[in-house]
């Protein structure tokens, strides 16, 4: 694997070449990260609305706003990450062709692009109510400091979980105007879910990471990764079920809707080949579908 950028994708064929470095910088060609950032917010909006039947116009408008916000903030997070990591990225085979280490975008240009992503994100945030606005501002500390974690702790995947699942808190706050127990349990479950899928993702780079001194749970867990990842997955699913119960104890569908989630986890663990980078990427990407199954759980 020489690069993580695939220039044959439709987005590159249908846009001006001068935009391509910025598309790559914001990872607009790889929507999986946007999905993984968006889904916890969608779970929370649906749960806080009392399921899909209780959504109403406000619920559906929030779903749209969170989708746009996730696209913008995922892009902003990638720019921040690449600004911090531009020297490290140049030493890792998969990332050395990213725009900053490759010289396709200057540091100044990256900061201007970051501002252009954050401005509309802030405008969206202002529509969500006081509690959600405060939470959104607080999330910037996580977005800004996450890239440092791989330098100081073996658990950067846990910090990513804190960051990527913040939407579970914001979605609930946007609907209810407060933070309640279901949102906190959902957030905790999301953190464990991220620990699982991002450990799988980190197995792609473990040799290069060890060489340049980057820490990860993939290196920490080593050959025990599959068993530990499985424990994280099932603990996360348990918390998703608990959050659903707290939000809607009268639902008779919870057990039935947990079943396809269990099957998906079992498939991931069975098919994942830890020493195969392509397999790790495939299973990591499959977590969009797992997240959609959790969304289905929240709907009924």
Image (cartoon, rainbow, N blue to C red):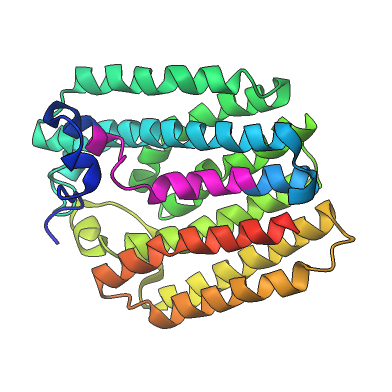
Asked if residue 197 is among those painted magenta in the image, a careful observer would answer: no
Front one among 89 and 12: 12
Asked if residue 173 shows in the view, the reply is no
Tell me where residue 94 appears, x and y as whole percent: 18, 54
Which residue is at the front of the view, 237 or 128? 128
Horizontal arrangement in the rendering, residue 267 relative to residue 275 (left or right): right
Q: Residue furthest right?
A: 250
**x, y percentage for residue 40?**
59, 48
Overall secondary structure of the magenta section: helix
> Farthest residue in the bottom direction?
270
Q: Is residue 295 above or below residue 15?
A: below
For residue 77, side relative to residue 297 (left or right): left
Residue 137, quarter of picture: top right
Q: Residue at x 30, y 72 (%)?
A: 279
Boundaries of the magenta span: 23-42
Is the C terminus in the top left, top right, bottom left or bottom right quadrant? bottom right
Above or below, 297 relative to 182: below
Image position of 32 (left or right of 186): left
Q: Is residue 207 left or right of residue 294?
A: left
Say which quadrant the N terminus sits in.
Answer: bottom left
Q: Position of residue 24 (x, y in %)?
A: 23, 38
Q: Position of residue 216 (x, y in %)?
A: 36, 57
Between 125 and 62, the one nearer to me in the picture: 62
- In the image, what residue occupies the spot 34% across and 31% down? 80
**Does residue 24 belong to the magenta stretch?**
yes
Identify the residue shown where x is 73% and y is 45%: 183
């Amino acid at each position: 694997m020489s690069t993580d950028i695939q220039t044959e994708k439709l987005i590159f064929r249908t846009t001006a070449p001068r935009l391509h470095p910025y598309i790559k910088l914001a990872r607009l060609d790889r929507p999986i990260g946007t999905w993984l950032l968006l889904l916890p917010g969608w779970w929370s909006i649906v749960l806080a609305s009392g399921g899909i039947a209780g959504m109403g116009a406000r619920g559906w408008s929030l779903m749209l706003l969170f989708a746009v916000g996730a696209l913008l903030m995922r892009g902003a997070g990638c720019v921040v990450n690449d600004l911090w990591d531009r020297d490290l990225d140049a030493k890792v085979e998969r990332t050395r062709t990213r725009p900053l280490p490759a010289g396709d975008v200057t540091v100044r240009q990256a900061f201007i692009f970051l501002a252009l992503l954050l401005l509309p994100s802030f405008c969206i945030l202002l529509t969500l109510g006081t509690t959600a606005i405060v939470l959104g501002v607080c999330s910037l500390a996580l977005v800004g400091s996450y890239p440092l974690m791989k330098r100081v702790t073996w658990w950067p995947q846990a910090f990513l979980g804190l960051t990527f699942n913040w939407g579970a808190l914001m979605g609930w706050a946007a609907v209810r105007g407060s933070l309640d127990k279901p949102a906190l349990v959902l957030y905790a479950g999301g953190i464990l879910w991220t620990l699982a899928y991002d450990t799988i993702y980190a197995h792609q780079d473990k040799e290069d990471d060890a060489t340049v001194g980057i820490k990860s749970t993939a290196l920490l867990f080593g050959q025990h990764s599959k068993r530990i990842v499985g424990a994280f997955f099932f603990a996360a699913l348990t918390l998703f079920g608990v959050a659903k119960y707290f939000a809607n104890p009268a639902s008779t569908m919870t057990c039935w809707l947990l079943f396809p989630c269990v099957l998906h986890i079992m498939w991931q663990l069975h098919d994942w080949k830890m020493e195969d980078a392509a397999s790790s990427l495939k299973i990591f990407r499959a977590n969009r579908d797992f997240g959609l199954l959790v969304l289905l759980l929240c709907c009924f």
